[in-house]
Image (cartoon, rainbow, N blue to C red):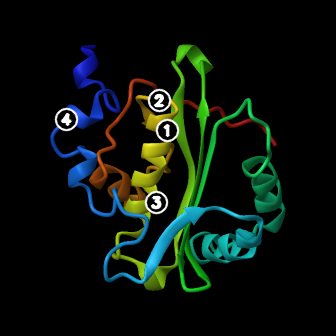
Amino acid sequence: MNEAKRPGVNEAKRPGVNEAKRPGVNEAKRPGSGWQIRPLEPDDMEGVISIDELHSGERKPHYWERAFGEQLSPDSRVIRVGLAAEEGDSLIGYLTGEVRAFEFGSEACGWILAVGVDPTHAREKVASSLLAAACRRFHEAGVTTVRTMVQRSDVPLLSFFRANGFVGGSFAQLELSLPE
């Protein structure tokens, strides 16, 4: 496939994906919004757990304790992106990701592992701004492609990623149900 047409490659040259034209991309604080983006911190864990519970319907403290342990680890061999959106002293959104390399013959690429926004801040471009900031960090790390996985039935999340320039990639996710 031609490099210029591959998703995530030469993004600055692709219409509609140029960072300068995407809302909230070149701003740590969105004008008139009252919220800002900053690095994820250990004290954000309870807020992340609460936002995730609002979306998933399940409280998962053990999952997030492990995820935060990995995300905030000082291991310099792994490039991780952990971002928080806050308004005043309140966490209103989060995004976690990391650079992964060479699984199944893939070149190094950024992976969005989790993104969530307090529903009271829906449609304020919080998630899009978090995603754009993560993409900048991935780009600074030399990554040219960003991937994620979304359940086919999660139409709002699929729509969010598509609205932010994501398209079907070159890999197909397969699974096998094991007997109980």
Measure the alpha-carbon separation of dots 1 and 4.
17 Å
Give neighbour class at mark 1: few <14, some 14-19, many 20+ (Cα, 10 Å): many
Give neighbour class at mark 3: few <14, some 14-19, many 20+ (Cα, 10 Å): many
Q: Which residue is mark 4?
A: 14
Q: Which residue is mark 1?
A: 138
Which mark, by number, is residue 156? none
Give neighbour class at mark 4: few <14, some 14-19, many 20+ (Cα, 10 Å): some
> Residue 43 lies in what quarter of the image?
bottom right
Extreme left residue here?
15
* Cβ–Cβ under 8 Å for marks 2 and 1: yes
* Cβ–Cβ under 8 Å for marks 1 and 4: no
Q: Which amino acid is tagged 2?
A: Val
Disc 4 element: loop
Give the answer, above or below, for where 55 lies relative to 80: below
Disc 3 element: helix
Residue 3: x, y in percent? 28, 17
Task: Give the mark nearest the N terminus, 1 or 4.
Answer: 4
Could you tell me which residue is drawn at 39 percent across and 52 percent down?
A: 132
Which mark, by number, is residue 143? 2
Task: Give the mark nearest the N terminus, 2 or 1.
Answer: 1
Disc 2 element: loop
Which mark, by number, is residue 130? 3
Measure the alpha-carbon separation of dots 3 and 2.
17 Å
Q: Which amino acid is tagged 1?
A: Phe
Measure the alpha-carbon separation of dots 2 and 1.
5 Å
Residue 179: x, y in percent? 78, 37
Q: Which amino acid is tagged 4?
A: Arg
Number of marks drawn: 4
Residue 164: x, y in percent? 31, 52
Measure the alpha-carbon separation of dots 4 and 2.
16 Å
Inspect this view and state whether residue 87 appears: yes
